[in-house]
Image (cartoon, helix red, strand yellow):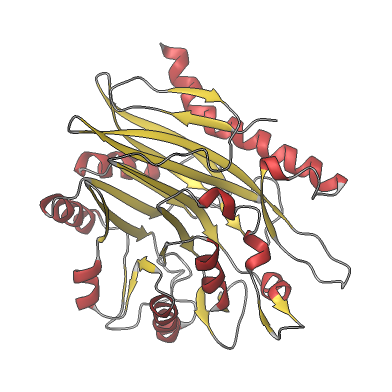
Amino acid sequence: MKISALYFLLTLPFHVVAQPWIVGDTVSEPDSIHLFFVGDIMQHEAQIKGAWEQTGQEYNYMPCFQYIAPYWEKADYVIGNLETTLSNRNFSGYPQFCAPWHLARDLKRSGIDILTTNNNHSCDKGADGIRNTIYYLDSLNIKHTGTFNDSASWKIQHPLYFRQGPFKIALLSYTYGTNGISVTHGQVVSIIDTFHMAREIEKARLDSATNIIVCMHWGIEYETLPDTKQKRLAAFLHKCGADIVIGSHPHVVQPIEYHTEGKDTTGVTIYSLGNFISNQSKRYTNGGIGLSLKLIRKQGKTHYQMQYLSSYVYRPVESDGIRRYYVIPEPDASHILGEQDKNLYKQFFNDTDKIINHIASKLNAKK
């Protein structure tokens, strides 16, 4: 079974093709930057229990990411959505997430460079949850955006900029809410607000950002198609000047949509990347996609090369009776999974291909 890939250039009509994904097949070239996005990084109680290593007497998440890490090696920046707070005690799963700080440590060791921290679970542990999460990410030298200890930090650090060669990338992140839990006075969780979003995109443009990426925590959980509000917000963001819109929260993969002006592709929206890792096991929730996005500057224009990599969350109960978790990209599955998981795995990849191609097929049919 092959991994579906999407490629497009700003100056050419897009098309959908299928082609094998080869680890390390993205070759660096002058005037380019390679980004890789993953979806919701969740920590249910069973995941926390599964990460405990009795022999070392500490939490170890490295096995979770061992099969996906090679796909990150050629990326300049790997970016994910951290849908839990971090701490060194009082851990908990749903409905108020708090994970061992070792999760962030091992994400960093595996290749994650940037995390968004604003989502509906940002305030699960109150002011201490926001403060501790920022503390551990800073200590581990992981770039992050979305939650801030004070308004001064928010004004200075949002957008988050990162640079390479001719690129100055602005990363903005917004969430629809915080599950009804009020943000502690003084702290900031970046919330979806068209007034602020327009101003911050304009700020990035005035700061000479070559590209603007907006991460959106939005939509309806478990719906495989975006709702009207998501579509309107995506159109608004692109009109304001965002190149790429990356979605999370539904816990399932949603389609990719292209934005065009005449014959030129001017932007792309990925409505939802789905679950990168979680304890959810129902159909559509047991995995997600990674988005490999390469930006290339040629003759004063930015061109895009894009692929998506589906990955399945394998949740075996091992010989010690403990359930453990592994993110499995397609090529590495056959010798790892049991018979039941092979079927679920195949179903997930087939479902994902159908979802991703939903809008593209409709648009192609109109040509």
Q: Quadrant of the N terminus?
A: top right
For this orientation, the residue located farthest to the bottom is 89
Is 60 in front, or is 281?
A: 60
Q: Residue at x 53, y 23 (%)?
A: 17
Q: Residue at x 39, y 78 (%)?
A: 134
**Residue 265 appears at what percent x and percent y?**
30, 27
**Residue 40 appears at what percent x and percent y?**
53, 58
Give the answer, above or below, for where 183 lies relative to 20: below
For this orientation, the residue located farthest to the top is 367
| Residue 76 visible in rendering | yes
**Residue 316 appears at what percent x and percent y?**
80, 60
Q: Residue at x 48, y 61 (%)?
A: 112
Give the answer, above or below, for where 42 lies relative to 166: below
Q: Residue at x 14, y 50 (%)?
A: 208
Image quadrant where residue 2 sits: top right
Is 229 in front, or is 83?
A: 83
Lateral position of residue 340 relative to residue 123, left or right: right
Lateral position of residue 290 relative to residue 283, left or right: left
Lateral position of residue 311 relative to residue 320, left or right: left
**Residue 177 appears at what percent x and percent y?**
40, 64
| Residue 227 visible in rendering | no
